[in-house]
Amino acid sequence: MEKFDINRTPKKRALSMQIDLNKFEKATDEEKAQSDVMSESTTFFKDGMRKLFKNPLAVASIIVLALIIVIIIVAPLIVPYGYEEMLSVNGKRDKGAKNLAPFEYSKAEEEYIAQGNFRFPHIFGTDEQCRDYFIRVIYGTRVSLVVGFFASLIVLMIGIIYGSISGYAGGRVDLIMMRIVDIIYSLPDMLVIILLSVVLQNVLKFKAGSVLASLGTNMISLFIVFGLLYWVGMARLIRAQILSIKENEYILAARSIGAKPGHIIRKHILPNCLSVIIISTALQIPSAIFTESYLSFVGLGVQAPMPSLGSLANSARGGLQSYPYKLVFPALMICLIVLSLNLIGDGLRDAFDPKLKR
């Protein structure tokens, strides 16, 4: 019986439909080495995230933003004061704890500590109503971040849907939809917020103690205004991108094989608009935070005693010469959040923009 040699190339038999393996050459050692150094298979998201984490500014911004989020979640579990709680010692209100400097105690608290008791320090001092300022800044940051993220989510969803339909449909549909956008652009957002606040205050009734009741009708009207007005910029950007992309060859090929418009927009057009979507959303968050801050600054934001960074800055304005640190803490928090989000947005754009890929 003939012994089978695994290294020997089998011969092609006569009248056989098999491929003649003798016509092929074996791969050289150099060609085998090239297959070893080839990049491994990856997805678009994994490739973008790998590039993002190579950007030192973006990584530092992610760390700063993550630390802020961790602090605003953990701090209320550690600090024994409430954002609306007036300081008291042994069950009696401490009237001497007004406008304390950072890490300073009142006379009543010093006597309490002298008796061998522990008193949690006032990290940022206290305000004019004897409330711990650190916990108020923490809750103010919570409110500002929640407003920024939810408002940006509303703007993103409405803007993408509206802009995609307008840009892909084109013609008369695009003309009518863009005229609606122009009309919305002409509406004064501040006036609309004031009118909605007045109207909704009499219409909306929230259960006492609920989250909506603590936010108040002013904040609810702010979310509604973002849903009604602030999506038009996102819609215009998406429309402009789709108008330049929809005539490309791969879009025409998808149409020729019978792909539906929804499938083409989701699978072929929006991925190529990803850089615009990412940077616009990342910039919309600080824009929403600024909007909430100046509305709270003029008294149209969250209702007292719930704080926000804007209302804290407004309260600190009265004692700016005597207690300047009260303005520094909320202003510094706003600057850190906005700068971090802007740098993260730039890093995401550089990582996920298909035009920047080599």
Image (cartoon, grey):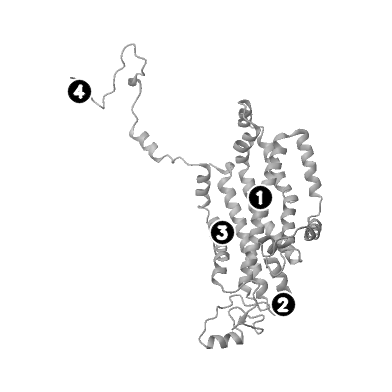
- Mark before the other along the chain sequence, 3 or 4: 4
| Residue matched to label 2 | 319
| Residue matched to label 1 | 280
Q: Amino acid at mark 3?
A: Ser
SS category of the residue bearing label 3: helix
| Residue matched to label 4 | 3
Distance (Cα) linking label 4 and label 2: 99 Å
Distance (Cα) linking label 1 and label 2: 37 Å
Q: Is residue 184 above or below residue 92?
A: above
Distance (Cα) linking label 2 and label 3: 32 Å
- Mark before the other along the chain sequence, 1 or 3: 3
In this image, 89 relative to 174: left or right? left
The label on residue 153 is none
- Mark before the other along the chain sequence, 1 or 2: 1
| Residue matched to label 3 | 61
Q: How many marks?
A: 4
Distance (Cα) linking label 3 and label 4: 67 Å
Distance (Cα) linking label 1 and label 3: 17 Å
Say which of 330 and 126 sits in front: 126
Q: Amino acid at mark 2?
A: Gly
Q: Amino acid at mark 4?
A: Lys
Q: Amino acid at mark 1?
A: Ser
